Image: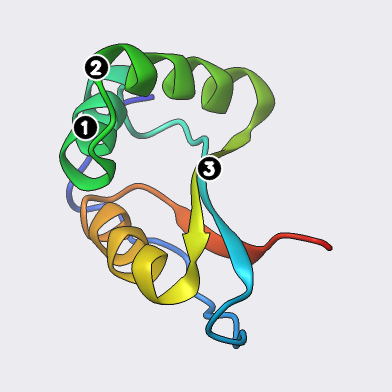
Amino acid sequence: MAYNPHTKLSEETDLLTAAEDPCSLIVWNDDVNTFEWVIETLVKVCSHSPEQAEQCAIIIDSKGKYAVKEGIYDILKPQCDAITDRGINATIEVIAH
């Protein structure tokens, strides 16, 4: 992962969900962002501890994506936007019941 602030990201798609539906904030692996940048982002945006953020980054790298946080859409949406604003691909998905 290497960070390039000028990289164009694919268009973001919002899910329409009921306000109380449990959702996951998914961060996707890429060949652009560094581990350090992903870790720093998760600490700042998601309030992860450095250790938790590092574990998430390792899983993202090995599995291709990881649900770094769960909650309701209205809480996760600003965090998702903040992550994508930092050049990292992120989406929100409804958790299957």
Marks 1 and 3 in Cβ contact (< 8 Å): no
Q: Can you say whether 3 is above or below 35 in the image?
A: below
Left or right: 79, with 30 as reference point: left
Residue 87 percent location from the top left of the image: 28, 50
Residue at mark 1 = 43
Circle 3 crowding by C-alpha within 10 Å: few under 14, some 14–19, many from 20: some
Left or right: 42, with 19 as reference point: left
Please give the name of the residue rendered at 61% of the width and 64% of the height, measured from the top-left corner: 22
Q: Amino acid at mark 1?
A: Val
Secondary-structure class at tag 1:
helix
Q: Amino acid at mark 3?
A: Trp
Residue 26 percent location from the top left of the image: 54, 49
Residue 42 percent location from the top left of the image: 28, 36
Left or right: 1, with 87 as reference point: right
Please give the name of the residue rendered at 53% of the width and 84% of the height, measured from the top-left corner: 19
Circle 1 crowding by C-alpha within 10 Å: few under 14, some 14–19, many from 20: some
- Residue 92 disc label: none
Separation of marks 1 and 3 at Cα, in angstroms: 16 Å
Q: Amino acid at mark 2?
A: Pro
Separation of marks 1 and 2 at Cα, in angstroms: 6 Å
Marks 1 and 2 in Cβ contact (< 8 Å): yes
Residue at mark 3 = 28
Q: Can you say whether 2 is above or below 88 in the image?
A: above
